[in-house]
Image (cartoon, grey):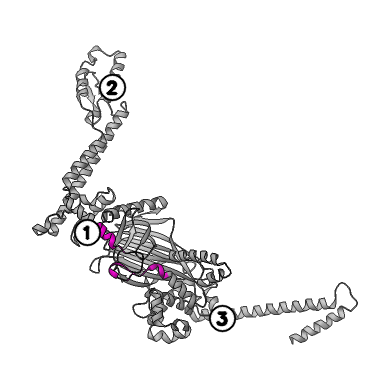
Amino acid sequence: EELRGLGERHSALRQSFPEGGGAGTEAEARLVATVTHCFQVCGQWAEALDYLEHLLRKQLAAAIGKEVSPADFAEYMCFHNRKLFADGYSPSPFCFPVRRSEHHSPEGTVSIEEQVVRGSGEPSISSPISTLVARSAGQHPMQFPLGASTTVSFAGDRYLHAWLAHQFSTQPAPKVSLVSRARQFSSMIVLVGRIASATVFEPKHAAIVQNKDELSIPLELSTIPTPKEFKDAIESLSPEQQAFAKAFRAMQLESTLFGILVVQIKPQLEKVLNLPENSLTKEIKLTQELMQLFIKYQIPSDLLSFDTEGLEMVGGASTVERLEAVRSHVAAMQAMIDKAKNEEVEERRREAVYDNPFGKGGGCSWGDDGSDMMMDSFAAGGGCMGGMAGGMARSALKKRSGAPRGSAPAPAAPMMMRCAAAPPPPPAAAMCCEVSLSAAAAAAPPPSPQPQQQQQQQQPQRQQQEPDNGPIGVGGVEVRDYTQVPKVMDARFERLDSDGAVRPTIISPGDVWTKRAQKALLGKPDESKLRSEEQKSEKDAAFDLLDALTKSGALAIDHADLHVVVAATHCFDKTVTEVVVQDNANPIEKVERSTLIMASTVHGVAPAVLVRDSQHPRVSAASPALFLEDAPEASADLLG
C-alpha cells in the first residue's frame, strides 16, 4: 500500500512537470517527494516506539507499584547482595565502633555516610554505605610520619573495603561524608590520608574527637576513565606517549586508596605512663586531667609517668600505687601551672601600672588633707614610682590653687624613702622559668642514665626490624601490599567487564568540615565550620598529642584500626527505567557482575566461592566469564 501510494504521487508529478525544462525537473520533484515520505515514515516509527515504550513504562510501574529511582535501586542491591553472597562475604555497612576489645564499651564510632535523596518533598536521610570488607589482624607493623624526623609504628586490625557506587543519568552527585562520633568522657584520634606502600600510611589530615564531639568531613568523588576507554585512547599514541600515560594512570589508581586510621588514646596513655592495662578505664577525672595537660599545655610524658626503676628488685608496685603516683604528678604539675598563671597575671598588672602611671587606680595619690599618701597600686601589686610621681603632681596642683600650709606634704619624704627602698619586681620570664624548674624538679625524680642508654640501644634495633616496602613483613610474615589492589582490580575489570562501564573513583576530603562540640556537660552543642586554618590547628594538636603518647616515635601504638577504602562507580548513561525499557537490559545483573569482580579482588578468592549454592546456576548463566577462570590461578593473581 505504501509503494502504491508513492507510485501514484510520482505519476501526478510526471504530469505536473512535463519534459522540456523549467524551474524544476521531474526528477527533482520525485526526489523531494521521496525524502518527504521517508521523513514522515520515520516520524511515525518514532511515535510508535515512544507509544510502546510508554506502555512498557506504565506496565513496569504498575507491576512494581512506582517508578524506580536510583535510591530505590541502591536499596534493592543491598537486599540482593544479602541473598547472593555466602556467609562471611556479604557487604556490610561502613560503621565501626572504636573499642579496645569486645569486653570494653566503645569510645565512639567511625562511619562513611551517604545522603540519600529519595524524591521531591521527602527528607534526605544519611545512612552508612555498604562495602565489601576483608578483615585481618595486624601481624606486621605499619608506620606513619609525624614529621621529617619522627615516624610512629602502629599495630591493630586492618580492614580492606571495596565500595561500588551507582550513577544513572540525571542523578546528582552523591553526598558522602566521613563522620566520627565520640561518647562522653571518651576520646580518639582520627587520621585521614593515603596508602603509600605496604607498610607506610601517609596522613594528610588529623583531628582529636572527644567528649560527644561529632566531626563530619565531606568526601569528594572523582572518576577516571575505564580500562577499556584508557586502552582505546592510547592505542594510536607512540610508545613514549603510552609509557607516560600508563605511568600517570598508575599514580591515579593508587590515589583511589583512601585510608582512615583511628587511634585509641586511653590504652596509649596507660602505656606511656607505665600503668597496667585497663587501669584508666574508670579513672575519668584523671584521664581528663591528663588529656588537658597533654593537649593544652604539651607537658612531656616523662614528668607524669610512673617511675619503674628498681621495682624489679622489690617486687613491683600495685595498680593503686601506680595510679596514686601518677595522680600526685598531675596535681603537682597543675599546682605549678596555677602558680605560673598567677605570677603572670601579677606581672601584667605591674606592667600596666608602669605604662600608665596617671591611669585610674594606678600610682600613689595624696589624701584629702594632703598629709598622707595612699599606695593603691602598691597594695594591688603595682609599682611605687608611678604612684609617687602621681602623688607629687597632684600635691603641686593643690599648692598652686591656694591650699593651706597645713596640707603641705611633709610626710612625703619618709614615704618616698619606703618606696625607694622596695626592690624592683623580677622579670616575668625569670619568675616563670624559676617556678617551672622548681616544680618540675619536685614533681618528677631525675631520670637515671641507664633507661636512656637502653632506649638508645632499642631504637637502632627497632629501626633494623622495620619492614621495607616489599611483600615480606616482619619475621617473614607475608604482607599484603594494598597499593597493588587497584591495579589487580583494574586488570580484572578490563578482562571480565564486557560493558566497560566501571570507572575507578578517587576519594578526597572536602574543603570545609563541620564539627559539633559540647563545651559544657549541660550545655548545648555548638556547630562550627573548619576551614584550612582550623584544619591545620586540629592536625597540629593531634600530632602534638601523638608525639607525647609515643615519646616521639619511641613507643609503638598497639590499639589502632586502619580502614583502606577502594572505590569504583558503575556508570549508566540512562535512567533506571530507560535501561530496562530502551536497552532491554537488566541493570541488576550488570551491577552484580561488577560487585563479584570487586569482591573476588578484595577477598582473594574465586567468584564461585563467594556465591551461595542456590544462586550459582543463575549467576553462572548471567555472567559465564566469571566462572571460566581457573580458581588457583585466579586466587594467586588476586593476592598479588
Callout 3: helix, strand or loop?
helix
Callout 2: helix, strand or loop?
helix
Asked if the residue at tag 3 contacts the one at tag 1, i.e. Cβ–Cβ closer than 8 Å, the answer is no
Circle 3 sits on which residue? 56
Q: CA distance from mark 3 to mark 2?
A: 100 Å
Identify which amino acid the numbered label 2 is placed on.
Ala
Identify which amino acid the numbered label 3 is placed on.
Leu
User: Residue 19, percent across and down?
Assistant: 89, 79
Q: Report which quarter residue 286 is drawn in.
A: bottom left
Identify which amino acid the numbered label 1 is placed on.
Lys
Nearest-to-viewer mark from 1 and 2: 1
Q: CA distance from mark 1 to mark 3?
A: 67 Å
Circle 2 sits on which residue? 389
User: Residue 604, percent across and down?
Assistant: 38, 76
Point out the stretch of residues depicted in magenta: 459-485
Q: Residue at x 44, y 64 (%)?
A: 255
Question: Is 629 situated above or below 320?
Answer: below
